[in-house]
């Protein structure tokens, strides 16, 4: 997160709160504090490296909520965790995947969120591909073949290069040829799934009910070396996402009749129903304490990585803005609130619950700034459909020093 965008957020909160003469002095102090005493790296390290991913219902999510409250309080800012509901508790363990036939290789992959665990010590089995069958009746007749096996349910990728890299280094003819072949293959795989008569959620459950040892998938992000890790739909056997290259290798081996075997040990633990929270912090207003200017960023993440881009960046930005404002502008005219929402990834649950739990506050919120766009330059600010918002945003941004914007 570049510091100049942090300056802009703090300064936009300031405008309209003070007379111009006072604004200039506070602006300089905000810029100075952000440049000379930035805490962004320290906050990011504590959250992303120290706590890690923040899957709703996980121990790390609760640890993050408690850490944020403690961090705000260390800055002299009031903070609290507000429970808004409950969620399925789950704690990720190790994932070890080894191909043991036709030769030995450790594979790169991890279990999906909320995946059931392997038997203690793991289990070995042949890897097979979901076949292209005529219809749902043929699929039902084939189902007994999955017993004791791992079933591949994703299409393998024809290339591991992102399109921008293809376009840069290939001829126009080869680039267009690759895209056409990819489209044909993807459509054929979608048709293969549809002919089972089951959706993508129901298919893994049907396979596990028929005795499959586990489900193998690969959800490529279309970026170099990165897959997307979301939630499992199985209830008894593990679902594992394999890297693009390892998935492709297993697919080719199975497709050519080599009968690859893997040993999978994916451990996890169900922890029962867990309370879920939003973390709220505030700097009380002095003149209009019942009117609010609000910051927000969702706090939860999927747990395939550390949750840095989505949405650790927004989280640390809002925390640093609050820290600087408390240091430089501790007595705002209106109350400044920040909401770190839980379970955004499953349907904006935390923020929606906050609205339901605080109906009396909604008409008193004068402005809300949300960040969930990851890293890089802030190219635009959306007014979210509020007709006059662009007039305000334009006026506020015009007062931010040019070297910052």
Image: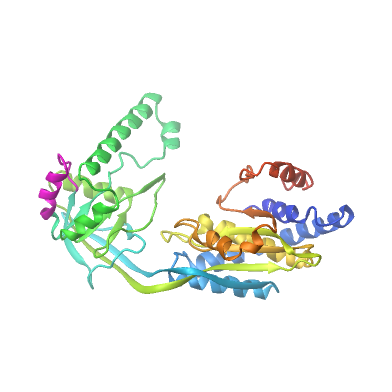
Give the residues in magenta. Answer: 130-145
In the depicted structure, whether residue 196 falls above or below residue 23: above
In the depicted structure, whether residue 88 falls above or below residue 134: below
Tell me what residue is drawn at x 45 percent, y 65 percent.
Answer: 56
Position of residue 354 measured from the top left corner of the image (x, y, whole percent): 57, 63
Quadrant assignment, res 126: bottom left
- For the question of whether residue 212 can be seen, the reply is no
In the depicted structure, whether residue 240 falls above or below residue 327: above
Position of residue 156 measured from the top left corner of the image (x, y, whole percent): 28, 44
Position of residue 238 measured from the top left corner of the image (x, y, whole percent): 27, 62
Tell me what residue is drawn at x 61 percent, y 67 percent.
Answer: 280
Tell which of 136 and 77 is nearer to you: 136
Q: Is residue 77 left or right of residue 160?
A: right
- For the question of whether residue 284 can be seen, the reply is yes
Position of residue 74 measured from the top left corner of the image (x, y, whole percent): 66, 75
Tell which of 314 and 297 is nearer to you: 297
């Amino acid at each position: 997160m570049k510091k100049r965008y942090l300056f802009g957020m703090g300064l936009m909160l300031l405008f309209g709160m003070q007379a111009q003469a006072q604004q200039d002095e506070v602006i300089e102090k905000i810029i100075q504090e952000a440049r000379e005493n930035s805490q962004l790296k320290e906050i990011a390290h504590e959250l992303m490296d120290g706590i890690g991913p923040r899957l709703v219902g996980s121990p790390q999510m609760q640890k993050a909520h408690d850490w944020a409250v403690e961090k705000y309080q260390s800055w002299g800012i009031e903070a609290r965790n507000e429970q808004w509901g409950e969620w399925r508790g789950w704690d990720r363990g190790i994932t070890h995947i080894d191909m043991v036939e036709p030769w030995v290789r450790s594979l790169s992959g991890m279990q999906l969120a909320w995946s059931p665990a392997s038997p203690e010590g793991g289990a070995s089995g042949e890897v097979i591909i979901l076949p292209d069958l005529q219809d749902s009746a043929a699929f039902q007749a084939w189902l007994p073949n999955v017993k004791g096996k791992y079933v591949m349910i994703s299409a393998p990728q024809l290339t591991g290069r992102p399109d921008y890299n293809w376009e840069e280094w290939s001829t126009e003819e080869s680039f267009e040829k690759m895209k056409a072949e990819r489209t044909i293959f993807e459509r054929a795989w979608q048709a293969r799934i549809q002919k089972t008569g089951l959706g993508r959620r129901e298919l893994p459950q049907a396979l596990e009910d028929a005795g499959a040892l586990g489900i193998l998938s690969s959800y490529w992000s279309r970026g170099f070396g990165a897959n997307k890790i979301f939630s499992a739909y199985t209830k008894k056997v593990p679902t594992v996402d394999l890297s693009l290259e390892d998935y492709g290798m297993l697919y080719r081996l199975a497709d050519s009749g080599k009968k690859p075997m893997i040993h999978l040990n994916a451990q996890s633990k169900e922890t029962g129903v867990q309370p879920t929270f939003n973390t709220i912090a505030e700097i009380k207003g002095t003149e209009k304490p019942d009117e609010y200017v609000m910051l927000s960023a969702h706090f939860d993440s999927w747990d395939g990585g550390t949750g840095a881009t989505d949405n650790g960046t927004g989280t640390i930005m809002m925390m640093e803005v609050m820290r600087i404002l408390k240091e430089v502008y501790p007595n705002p005219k209106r109350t400044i609130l920040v909401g770190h929402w839980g379970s955004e990834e499953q349907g904006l649950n935390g923020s929606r619950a906050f609205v339901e739990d605080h109906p009396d506050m909604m008409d008193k919120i004068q402005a809300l700034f949300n960040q969930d766009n990851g890293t890089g330059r802030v190219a635009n600010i959306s007014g979210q459909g509020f007709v006059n918002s662009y007039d305000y945003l334009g006026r506020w941004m015009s007062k931010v020093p040019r070297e910052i914007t």
